[in-house]
Each structure stands twice: as C-alpha cells, then as structure tokens.
Amino acid sequence: MGSCYNSTVVDTPVEKTWETVRNFHQLGWAAPVVERVDPVGDIPGDQPGARRVLNGMFHETLVSLDDEGHEFSYSIDDGPGPVSNEAVENYLGVVQLHPVTDTGQTLVVWTSSYDSDDPAAVGDFCNPIYQGLLAALKDYLKD
C-alpha cells in the first residue's frame, strides 16, 4: 500500500478554513491547480456520494464529511496516468483540519492511501498536486 502526506498551516481559524474547503463541488480556493469542477449527478457537494470531475480528468466521489471533526474523505475513481483505474485501486484521500490553539491558525493535513503496483509513481504524481492545492489554500486565506 502506498501513501502520501502533505500539510501546511494557514492563518485562519479552523471554522473559517473548514467553511472554505468543506463543499466538494466548490473549489474556487484551489485555482490555478483546479481550473474546472464538474459536479456529476444530483447529490449536493456536502453529502457523501457527491461526485465530481476535476479539470476534465480526475473522477472523484465524496466518501465522508464530518463537520464536527473538520474532516472529509474521497475516492479517486479514475484519473490520468498513475491514478487511472487500471493503475491504482482503493485510492482514498483524507483532508483533516486541526486548530492551532495558541495562534488561532489551522493545521491542514492532506493524506492519501492506495494500492498500486508502482506506489512511488503514484506518490511522485500526487504529492506535487497536493502541495499545490495546499499552497493555493494558504494564498486564498491570506488577509
């Protein structure tokens, strides 16, 4: 099993950060990494089972959303290259927010786990994307 781990600290309280990221269909904060979000089906972006296609390539499904715990998980059902459904199975991404209590900031942790014959290739592909998403979030939440 392969995995990715990426994190950053943003200068906003956990509640504001959560309000920014919790809707699976609203990724305005993620530009320029995510240029297009196409919701698939009728399930709202804050309900498990919501599906989306990012940038015309990444087909994802919201697996869980925990407002109290400030966490959501999603699967990648198909995508390009090393995250295609032929190359990877059981891809689960998890975004967790933790309050930094002494500063009022938020620790954002983005992890994933997956089964692949080439887990290093998946990590090499996904880690820069997650790093870009975290940098975009940090920039979006700047005062």
Image: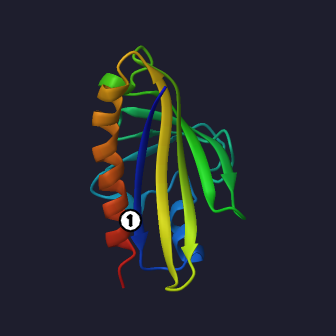
- From the viewer's perspective, tell me whether residue 24 is left or right of residue 48: left
Residue 105's place in the image compared with 110, above or below, is below
- From the viewer's perspective, tell me whether residue 3 is left or right of residue 61: left
Q: Secondary structure at mark 1?
A: helix
Residue 36 location, x and y as percent?
36, 47
Give residue 92's quadrant in the image.
top right
Residue 61 location, x and y as percent?
57, 37
- Residue depicted at x 67% and y 52%: 65
Most extreme residue toward the right is: 68
Q: Count all numbered tags in the image, as a single digit.
A: 1
Q: Is residue 80 visible?
A: no
Is the residue marked by circle 1 packed among few (<14), some (14-19), or many (20+) residues within 10 Å?
A: many
Q: Is residue 66 visible?
A: yes
Q: Which residue is mark 1?
A: 137
Of the 4 image quadrants, the one containing the C terminus is bottom left
- Residue depicted at x 39% and y 17%: 87
Residue 58 location, x and y as percent?
40, 34
Q: Nearer the viewer, residue 90 or 34?
A: 90
Residue 114 location, x and y as percent?
49, 28
- Residue depicted at x 33% and y 24%: 82
The residue type indicated by label 1 comes to: Leu
- Residue depicted at x 57% and y 67%: 98
Residue 85's place in the image compared with 55, above or below, is above
What colour scheme does the image use?
A: rainbow
Give residue 22's quadrant in the image.
bottom right
Residue 90's place in the image compared with 5, above or below, is above
